[in-house]
DNA sequence: GACTCACCCCAAAGCGCTTTGGACGCGGCC
DNA sequence: GGCCGCGTCCAAAGCGCTTTGGGGTGAGTC
């Protein structure tokens, strides 16, 4: 069923039918009702391509996922973020366009999305320090919102971010309060902005007490389970093992726990662990007393926020760049405890 | 830069420019070269909406994700599948359209995708027994490929699936060979087709030896970590605990392992575990000797296969419905061992 | 020299929608 | 009575591309 057919059926012009359906005031209530009824009855849906050609709006938002690494981006955290954003899009009548592109083709991909006219806006994932995408998109002139921040971008842009520094500062403070002095940081890739900030929080907490973290205890890599396991395993076997771990992802923390248990130690007694918890739906850390002491912040919710912000921006282009910083909660679980007097052999 | 401008610039008609760029034979090689060079130099990209309006092809594939459950679909397995499919799409010039829709709006969503003309085809995720979507899509007339199968669909359709029954049959056989007789099945939601098949394999292996699995040892739910933990914990505390677990997802298996270790037991010695392993990138089970004995089949690869099949089908509409069944490998890890003579207290 | 036939190229007609710029009729006002 | 304004509706012009149906031009053929 196309507009023309519908209009002929109603003995009205295409103009009137289109206006009736799109809520323009130039059509009488009676006609509007009649048109709406007929449209519903025949299941008329405007062809989205024709409409966006005519209006110049795509009614779609793009998410460009860098294929740099096989692990980092197409990951479970991303899935939850997408789920949150997707809720908002469908509620507001937008589609979501996903493109996976190799890293070297990224710039090209963004430009192409613009000139192809495939999307009205973009969400930028996983910003790095010195991320050129922000400059690029400002230049291209496509509205966008960054999930995270790029430390050194000097131009204004919109972002939604968790207060990584503060969260890791608090987590580190907790461990220090419990008496731990040898704390390992099992961080994400430090080319990523969020990981930098987490590390900053970690160091800040030490510095505030006149302490300096041991560089040998700080690692950085893609946040897989295996990375957590291997890192913890190696550190715990070393001469001066850490007594606590601060971990950047619950998946990595699961690996850390595995290493601890393999060595016959008990998490929460022999070794303390705090992890960041993105509140992933299938990896809930929500028992009566959660398994992991954690800094928690729902990435799904971040997806919702970023999406709403972007749509608002698209529908209201004049507005100032807006940003939203939210705090993670620090919740106590079973994985932390005071430093043992006699360290486990 | 639009076609018209480019053509004026070249002193050619739009027709010729369009044909030159799209590889039609009616234009001389010399002109084609000239046009291509100019297009590249000015970064000309045809507007995708105009093009698809003109050609009737959307150059996009839809993935409709049911929002039924907060856990089941928007999950890490899905993320890897998407990654695989996305590789194929971008290589072949297609976009990927993701819509998250509430369960009750699914039918509506599919019809709308068709009439809106937003996509050329669809991938169907997580088919259930008696899934109405297959009939619906055949009726609507939108090409599609199912990831998995719907047991009782009597119409032909395309699918890509792992041999779930066989994989779980083999896994169960291994446990039985090791002497285990009380094997727990920690399955996914049995409204899902794949879970049904896995259960069938499990039962088949028992039946082949004249055994009958204890229904008390069979559970079914969304494959979260918590579900694995709670189920294993409860079963191991019961009167006649299982000596082995067969688990449907590595995430759930991680929960099972947690429960085992909480009870002071050792996986692979006191309790055996086999899990299905979707070969997720951030949850690799690939040590020298893998942690889990597992039936492994890359879901990312399944995504690639499903996407290629769909695109082939779209580009060659006449073809017979095709299907692809692939086997999982059974790989031995540290989590299985022979039944202990004296069961752990 | 007329004719055919490739070979290149073009003008114009869509694709299905929105939107501009009226047209028409009717009541109210001076 | 003429004029204006308002409420309704319509014809037609795009949006940027592909594609149909020719139209020239020059080489080859008789």
Image (cartoon, coloured by chain):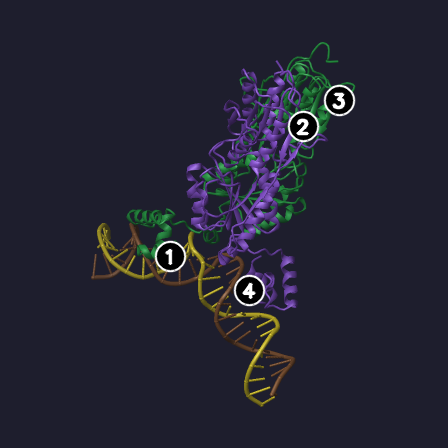
Chain colours: A green, B purple, C yellow, D brown
Camera-side mark, 4 or 1: 1
The first of marks 1 and 3 along the sequence is 1
Camera-side mark, 1 or 2: 2
Q: Secondary structure at mark 4?
A: helix
Q: Are marks 2 and 3 on the same chain?
A: no
Left or right for B87, reference A44: right
Location of the C terminus of chain B by quadrant is: top right
Camera-side mark, 2 or 4: 2
x then y, percent, for residue B292: 65, 28
In three-dimensional space, the C-alpha distance between marks 4 and 1, rounded to whole angstroms, equals: 28 Å
x then y, percent, for residue A190: 69, 32
Q: Are marks 4 and 1 on the same chain?
A: no
Callout 2 touching callout 3 (CB < 8 Å): no
In three-dimensional space, the C-alpha distance between marks 3 and 4, rounded to whole angstroms, equals: 66 Å
Q: Nearer the viewer, residue D15 or A63?
A: A63
Left or right for A277, reference A191: left
Give me the residue at 75% from left, 19% from top: A241
Q: Are marks 1 and 2 on the same chain?
A: no
Q: In the rendering, which numbered label is found on residue B14?
A: 4
In three-dimensional space, the C-alpha distance between marks 1 and 2, rounded to whole angstroms, equals: 63 Å
Disc 3 crowd rating (10 Å Cα; few below 14, some 14-19, many 20+) is: some
Q: Residue furthest front?
A: B210
Q: Which residue is mark 1?
A: A4
The first of marks 2 and 4 along the sequence is 4
Q: Quadrant of residue A199?
A: top right
Q: Are marks 1 and 3 on the same chain?
A: yes
Camera-side mark, 2 or 3: 2
x then y, percent, for residue A291: 59, 20
**Chain letter for the residue marked with disc 2 in the picture:** B
Q: Secondary structure at mark 1?
A: helix
Q: Is residue A163 visible?
A: yes
x then y, percent, for residue D20: 48, 67
């Amino acid at each position: 069923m196309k507009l023309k057919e519908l209009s002929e059926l109603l003995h009205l012009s295409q103009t009137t039918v289109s206006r009736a359906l799109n809520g323009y005031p130039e059509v009488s209530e009676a006609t509007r009702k009649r048109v709406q009824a007929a449209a519903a009855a025949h299941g008329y849906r405007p062809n989205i391509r024709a409409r966006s050609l005519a209006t110049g709006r795509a009614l779609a938002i793009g998410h460009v996922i860098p294929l740099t690494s096989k692990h980092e981006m197409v990951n479970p955290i991303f899935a939850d973020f997408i789920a949150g954003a997707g809720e908002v899009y469908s509620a507001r009548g937008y589609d979501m366009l996903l493109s996976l592109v190799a890293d070297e083709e990224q710039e090209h991909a963004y430009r192409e999305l613009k000139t192809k006219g495939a999307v009205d806006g973009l969400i930028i994932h996983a910003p790095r320090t010195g991320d050129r995408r922000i400059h690029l998109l400002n230049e291209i002139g496509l509205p966008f919102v960054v999930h995270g921040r790029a430390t050194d971008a000097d131009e204004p842009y919109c972002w939604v971010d968790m207060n990584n520094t503060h969260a890791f500062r608090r987590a580190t403070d907790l461990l220090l309060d419990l008496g731990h002095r040898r704390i390992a940081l099992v961080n994400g890739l430090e080319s990523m902005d969020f990981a930098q900030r987490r590390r900053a929080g970690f160091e800040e907490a030490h510095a505030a007490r006149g302490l300096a973290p041991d560089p040998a205890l700080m690692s950085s890599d893609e946040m897989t389970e295996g990375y957590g396991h291997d890192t913890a395993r190696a550190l715990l076997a070393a001469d001066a093992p850490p007594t606590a771990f601060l971990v950047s992802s619950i998946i990595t923390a699961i690996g850390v726990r595995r290493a601890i248990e393999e060595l016959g130690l008990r998490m929460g007694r022999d070794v303390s662990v705090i992890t960041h918890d993105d509140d992933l739906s299938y990896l809930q850390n929500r028992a009566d007393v959660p398994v992991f002491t954690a800094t928690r912040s729902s990435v799904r919710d971040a997806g919702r926020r970023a999406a709403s912000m972007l749509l608002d921006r698209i529908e209201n282009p004049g507005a100032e760049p807006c940003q939203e910083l939210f705090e993670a909660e620090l919740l106590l679980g079973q994985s932390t405890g005071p430093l043992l007097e006699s360290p486990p052999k």
